[in-house]
C-alpha cells in the first residue's frame, strides 16, 4: 500500500501543473478547474490499481478531469452560487496571464464543448479521434465543433484588432 501511495503522490506532483493548464483552458474558471481536478484525482486514487495499469495514465486522468469540468458546466445553471470574474479588492496575481490575454478570453467565451475541442486540439495536440474518444462523440462532431469555434474566434479576434 505504501508503494502505491508513493507512486500516486509522484504521479500527482508530476501531472498537476500540466493538467491544471489544460483543464483551465477548457473550464475557463480557476475554481471550477481546481474542483474538477480534485474530483478526478480522488477518483483516480480510488481506482489506482486500474489507472496505474493503463497504457497512458495521463490520458486516463485528463479524460476524467475534462469530463468533470464539462459536467460542472452542465450543472452550473442548477447551482445557487455564482462566480464573479474578479474578487473585489483582491490583487491580481502576476502569473495569471491567461486572465488578460485576448486570445484566451475569446476561447473562454466559447461554449464548453467548443472550448474543450480547441484546448485539446491546439493546446494539448490531441488528434480528432483522441478528442472524440475523450468527449464521447464522433470525430465528425469534433471537426464541426472545431470549425465553428475557429470561425467564432476569427470573428472575435478580428473585431478586437480593428478596435485598437
Image (cartoon, grey):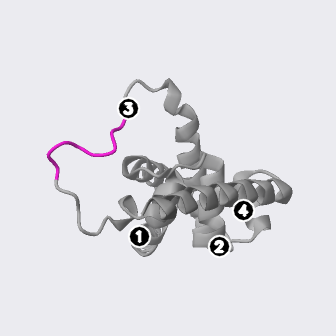
Q: Which residue is mark 4?
A: 131
Foreground residue among 155 and 146: 155
Callout 1: few (<14), some (14-19), or many (20+) C-alpha neighbours within 10 Å?
few
Give the magenta range: 82-90
Reply above or below: 45 against 72. below
Please state the horizontal and vertical placement of residue 73, each as a whole percent of the image.
54, 40
CA–CA distance in space, label 1 to label 2 = 17 Å
Q: Are marks 3 and 2 in contact (CB under 8 Å)?
A: no
Residue identified by numbered label 1: 17
**Label 4 vs label 2: CA separation?**
15 Å
> Badge 4: few (under 14), some or many (20 or more) residues near its Cα, within 10 Å?
many
Q: CA distance from mark 3 to mark 4?
A: 29 Å
Using residue 51 as the reference point, say whether residue 161 is left or right of it. left
**Cα–Cα gap, marks 3 and 2:** 36 Å
- Circle 2 Cα neighbour tier, 10 Å, few/some/many (<14 / 14–19 / ≥20): few
Q: Pick whichever, 146 or 23, lies toward us.
A: 146
Q: Is residue 123 visible?
A: yes
Residue 143 x, y percent position in the rendering: 79, 60
Residue under label 2 = 56
Residue nearest the observer in this picture, 79 or 58: 79
Q: Earlier in the sequence, mark 4 or mark 2?
A: 2
Q: Nearer the viewer, mark 1 or mark 2?
A: 1
Residue carrying label 3? 82
Decide which of tag 1 and tag 4 comes sooner along the chain.
1
Which of pointers 3 and 4 lies earlier in the amino acid sequence? Answer: 3
Mark with earlier residue (1, 2): 1
Alpha-carbon distance for marks 1 and 4? 20 Å
- Of tags 4 and 2, the one toward the viewer is 4
Amino acid at each position: 500500500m505504501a508503494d502505491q501511495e508513493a507512486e500516486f503522490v509522484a504521479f500527482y506532483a508530476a501531472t498537476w501543473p500540466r493538467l491544471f493548464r489544460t483543464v483551465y483552458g477548457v473550464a475557463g474558471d480557476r475554481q471550477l478547474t481546481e474542483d474538477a481536478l480534485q474530483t478526478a484525482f480522488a477518483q483516480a486514487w480510488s481506482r489506482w490499481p486500474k489507472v496505474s495499469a493503463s497504457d497512458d495514465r495521463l490520458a486516463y486522468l485528463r479524460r476524467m478531469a475534462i469530463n468533470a469540468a464539462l459536467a460542472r458546466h452542465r450543472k452550473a445553471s442548477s447551482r445557487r452560487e455564482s462566480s464573479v470574474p474578479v474578487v473585489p479588492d483582491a490583487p491580481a496575481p502576476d502569473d495569471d496571464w491567461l486572465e488578460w490575454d485576448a486570445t484566451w478570453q475569446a476561447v473562454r467565451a466559447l461554449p464548453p464543448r467548443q472550448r474543450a475541442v480547441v484546448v485539446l486540439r491546439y493546446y494539448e495536440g490531441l488528434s480528432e479521434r483522441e478528442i472524440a474518444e475523450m468527449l464521447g462523440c464522433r470525430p465528425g462532431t469534433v471537426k464541426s465543433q472545431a470549425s465553428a469555434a475557429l470561425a467564432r474566434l476569427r470573428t472575435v479576434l478580428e473585431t478586437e484588432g480593428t478596435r485598437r
